[in-house]
Amino acid sequence: MPRNVVRTAAAATLTAALLTTGACAEGGSGTAGRPQGGSTQEPKPLKWGECSAPTPAEGGGQVPGKDWQCATLDVPLDYADPEGKTIPIALIRAKARDQKHRLGSLVFNFGGPGGSGISTLPGAAQEYAALRARYDLVSFDPRGVGRSAPVRCEDDKQLDAYYAQDSSPATPAQEKAYLDGLRKYQEACKKNSGTVLPHVGTENAARDLDRIRQALGDEKLNYFGISYGTELGGVYAHLFPKNVGRTVFDAVVDPTQNAEQGALGQAKGFQLALGNFAQDCVDRGDACRLQGSTAKEIEANVIKLQKALAAKPIPGIGDRMLGESAATNGIAQALYSKELWPLLEQGLDEAEGGQGQLLMALSDALNGRDQQGRYSNLGAANAAINCADSKDRYSLAQTKAKLPEFRKASPVFGDFLGWAMLSCTDWPVPGSWNTPDVSAPGAAPILVIGNTGDPATPYEGARKMAERLGKGVGVELTYKGEGHGAYNSGDACVQQAVNTYLLDGKVPTAGTVCTPAASPSPAASPGPA
């Protein structure tokens, strides 16, 4: 698992690349950064032009097609000094196909924290084609991400070594190496990005969102937040309730949990998803490549593989070896989407035979490493945003005391997520909150979708988010499915509910349940115009 507690991560855009890779593999801040007030001047109109290819920091990729336009919006580095230094926020859009009936802009955040909207939206746009009929589809690189004043820590070679270290130490020597690696990484972040680190928290990003709204010329912010994007959207709704337009939260972060509780919830979520994957394999009988006649036996074999790789890594990609940490990372990545389950089955089968290329490719995807060995700044931004937000700083003694609880929650992932509690301990910037305030009295209804099989943002978080948004604001919908998120599953019931709200303003009845087998049409009630 990642060294930083990844509360959320958008995996949908990685699926196609990983399917290709799999085929080949067979051969916040303290007072200085806390937002206080804002500029009295509205942002200047955006100057849209041709897009360049996503930078390596954004994950790389091809130049978007002719439908896409890009722009840059300058925002205050420090909202406590709104007329002071500015930083650029990079944006991308595809204009609505039906301009005559255009509703405005629909702004996406796909999660992370640390995910690039510039590289993600063009690749995912087909999934939102129905919404593009009447909305300009818009996304952005949040501050600290991609080409928006990106956080920089270690270089590619150093990151290869960093991710190769054991992140669930079992001996004093491994423990020292793990702690030394964390401190070295954090020192590099401070050295290379000390100016921006105090200002990359979610509250500042939410204020950026409102300036984006103004620059787009929209009276209200129409917003689709996925994963961490739901936390960002919740904070925005709290700060600017009167500016909330038609809004959807999918793969919802629990706003009531601190860092420890969130990590423990993820341990349970990933273990649940692994069990669902294993049961699916068993149900397919002889078609399943894995040994084991029950889900528990398959899980036991995964644990056996982890122990074997801890003792003796196997060949991975190039001269890199697949050890326990990278293998566990790869397993976690594949659990983000049911589409990746066949690759997980294949990767586990190959690793048991001594070949680790596929699990390492999956691990690389989670860490933001491309086939040329270049890392995006996903990991650096993730650490910086998480640590700027959370006040929690756990000692080594506190962390070790909690490990038994993590192991009980997940024999496969518990150790890794437990040790990751130390990710912010020596961070050079203090955090802003224990939990985010997302109360938004007076805001328009927000559709909150929980997926019962979600590993990274467990289902219970959706109800907690709906409750904290407030009565008449949070409207919960349940999807009984697998993977991280619901809309991108293709389920007709979920998509109809979302599309009907965003396009027609009709909110589904609170408590609507969508199941992949039946996919009933959701009931609707009038919403905001």
Image (cartoon, rainbow, N blue to C red):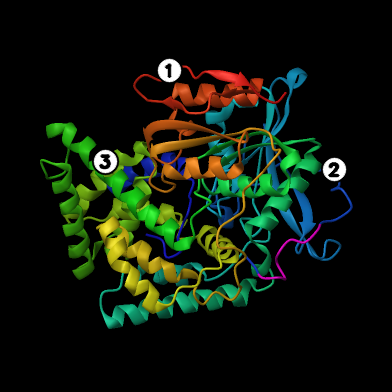
Structural distance between the alpha carbons of marks 2 and 3: 49 Å
Which residue is at a point 30% across and 78% down the rendered structure image?
A: 174
> What's drawn in magenta, residue-wise?
30-37
Secondary structure category for the residue under label 2 = loop
Q: Which mark is residue 520?
A: 1
Amino acid residing under circle 2: Pro
The answer to if 31 sits in the magenta stretch is yes
Residue 377, image x, y percentages: 55, 60
Instruction: Classify mark 1: residues with Cα within 10 Å, few (<14), some (14-19) or many (20+).
Output: some
Amino acid residing under circle 1: Pro
Q: Which residue is mark 3?
A: 277
Residue 288, image x, y percentages: 17, 37
Q: Nearer the viewer, residue 328 or 372?
A: 328
* Figure check: 115 above or below 425: above
* Figure check: 67 above or below 243: above
Secondary structure category for the residue under label 1 = loop
Q: Which residue is mark 2?
A: 45
Structural distance between the alpha carbons of marks 1 and 2: 43 Å
Indicate which disc, 2 or 3, sits on the residue closer to the N terminus: 2
Which residue is at a point 75% across and 39% down the rendered structure image?
A: 243
Indicate which disc, 3 or 1, sits on the residue closer to the N terminus: 3
Secondary structure category for the residue under label 3 = helix
Instruction: Classify mark 3: residues with Cα within 10 Å, few (<14), some (14-19) or many (20+).
Output: many
Res. 254 in view? yes
* Figure check: 7 above or below 225: below
